[in-house]
Image (spheres, rainbow, N blue to C red):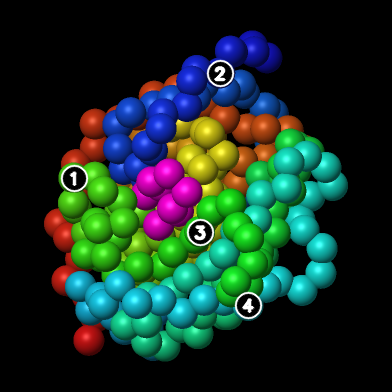
């Protein structure tokens, strides 16, 4: 395998932007994330509703129980906030999914570089993970507003509830896999990782590929580590069209 020198991470990295910032290396490609789903249709969670534009008021999750995820490395503490206009998804339920993803054996802590811990209200934190309505997403991201994608802006990791509820078409895997991808992709930006390209058609997509906008022949994959090694593609991004802003679910 060929080792590539990482490029400097961009200061502002969007889930759908076209500004790559960190190259990576190829790990063994024998472990795929999950079998493809038979349908390419968007899968929704009908019990969750939200407006296109929320109030910008937040509910904060409690601290996780137990120690930080990871065996070694820099400790980064994160808090989890859910916009109050989102109905049908308790903040601690969402936070538990986020924490389970970030604590998984194939997640960002697998390499021993970071430890990650969710903290509760009032505790010191290093970054915030938001679940936001589409237009609040635009305000937090501070980029060209699209109401569709998720992003990272400084210490803000912003997950668009529209994607959490609906996923994306032609993803080829279930909503659980897509949600894991959302979390790991945007938190990856907070950890200094840039966008990456599909290594080869038929292989797993790197988690830092913009899988929301297109797989380009790769298979959906939500994990940064496969087979115990960092799995990544060459630095870069595709010029994929961003769909229309999400209108919300009432």
Q: Is residue 160 left or right of residue 157?
A: left
Task: Mark 4 vs mark 2: give the one in front.
Answer: 4
Image vertical order of residue 92 relative to residue 243, above or below: below
Label 4 residue SS: loop
The secondary structure making up most of the magenta span is strand
The residue tagged 3 is 128
For marks 4 and 1, give the CA distance. Answer: 32 Å
Q: Magenta residues?
A: 151-158
As drawn, is 164 to the left or to the right of 110?
A: left
35, above or below 131, in the image: above
Q: Position of residue 247 (x, y in %)?
A: 17, 71
- Label 2, label 3: how many angstroms apart (C-alpha)? 25 Å
Task: Mark 1 or mark 2: name the one nearer the start of the chain.
Answer: 2
Residue highlighted by disc 2: 6
Mark earlier in primary sequence (3, 1): 3
User: Residue 153: in sight, yes or no?
Assistant: yes
Q: For mark 4, what is the residue? A: 62
**Quarter of image, res 82:** bottom left
Q: CA distance from mark 1 to mark 2?
A: 27 Å
Find out whether residue 90 is within the magenta segment.
no
First in sequence: mark 4 or mark 1?
4
Q: Along the horizontal axis of the image, is 57 left or right of 144?
A: right
């Amino acid at each position: 395998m060929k080792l590539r020198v990482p490029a400097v991470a961009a200061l502002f990295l969007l889930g759908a932007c076209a500004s790559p910032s960190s190259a990576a290396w190829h790990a063994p490609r024998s472990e795929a994330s999950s079998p493809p789903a038979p349908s390419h249709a968007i899968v929704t969670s009908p019990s969750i509703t939200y407006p296109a534009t929320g109030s910008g008021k937040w509910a904060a999750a409690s601290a996780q129980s137990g120690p930080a995820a990871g065996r070694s490395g820099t400790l980064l503490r994160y808090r989890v906030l859910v916009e109050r206009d989102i109905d049908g998804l308790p903040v601690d339920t969402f936070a538990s999914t986020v924490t389970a993803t970030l604590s998984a054996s194939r997640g960002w802590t697998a390499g021993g570089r970071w430890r990650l811990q969710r903290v509760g209200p009032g505790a010191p934190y290093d970054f915030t993970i938001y679940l936001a309505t589409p237009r609040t997403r635009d305000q937090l991201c501070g980029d060209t507003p699209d109401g569709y994608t998720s992003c990272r802006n400084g210490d803000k990791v912003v997950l668009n509830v529209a994607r959490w509820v609906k996923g994306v078409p032609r993803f080829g895997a279930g909503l659980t896999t897509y949600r894991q991808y959302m979390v790991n992709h945007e938190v990856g930006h907070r950890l200094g990782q840039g966008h990456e390209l599909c290594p080869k058609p038929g292989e797993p997509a790197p988690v830092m590929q913009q899988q929301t906008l297109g797989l380009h022949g790769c298979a959906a994959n939500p994990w940064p580590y496969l087979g115990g090694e960092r799995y990544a593609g060459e630095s870069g991004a595709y010029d994929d069209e961003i769909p229309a802003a999400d209108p919300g679910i009432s």
